[in-house]
Image: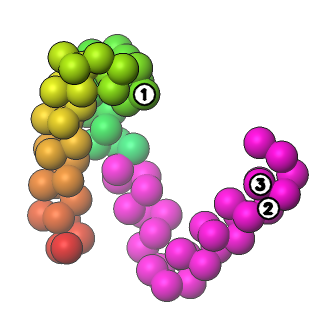
Amino acid sequence: MSIAGEQALEQAINELREVDSLFDEKVAYWNYLSGKFNTTGLSPMQLGKTPEGQAKLDVINAKVSAAMIAKYGE
């Protein structure tokens, strides 16, 4: 990533933090859930490369989404 790209990403993250004081907590929880529900040993990008992997990723994402909504609401 270029320096300009890194700066743009940092700015976008800081803007999200201003809008949502729980942003960092939500990111950490999402990371935890993703690791908990993805027991394949593959990254989401790797899973998404095949139809079978994408089907597994869809299930993982649905579980993560449900847990996030249960904790933080929509």
Residue 6 in the figure: left or right of residue 56: right
Which of the two residues, 2 or 13, is positioned nearer the viewer here? Answer: 2
Numbered tag placed on residue 7 in the rendering: 2
The x and y percentages for residue 69 are 17, 64
Disc number lying in front (3 or 2): 3
Q: Local crowd at mark 1 within 10 Å, few (<14), some, or many (≥20)?
A: few
Numbered tag placed on residue 5 in the rendering: 3
Numbered tag placed on residue 36 in the rendering: none
CB atoms of marks 3 and 2 within 8 Å: yes
Magenta residue span? 1-30
Say which label, 2 or 1, has the lower sequence index: 2
Q: Local crowd at mark 2 within 10 Å, few (<14), some, or many (≥20)?
A: few
Look at label 1 and name its amino acid.
Met
Please tell me in which quadrant of the rendered image residue 40 appears. Answer: top left
Q: What residue is drawn where x is 38% and y is 62%?
A: 26
Look at label 3 and name its amino acid.
Gly
CB atoms of marks 1 and 3 within 8 Å: no
Q: What residue is drawn where x is 18% and y is 73%?
A: 73
Residue 3 in the figure: left or right of residue 14: right
Label 1: which secondary element: helix
Say which label, 1 or 3, has the lower sequence index: 3
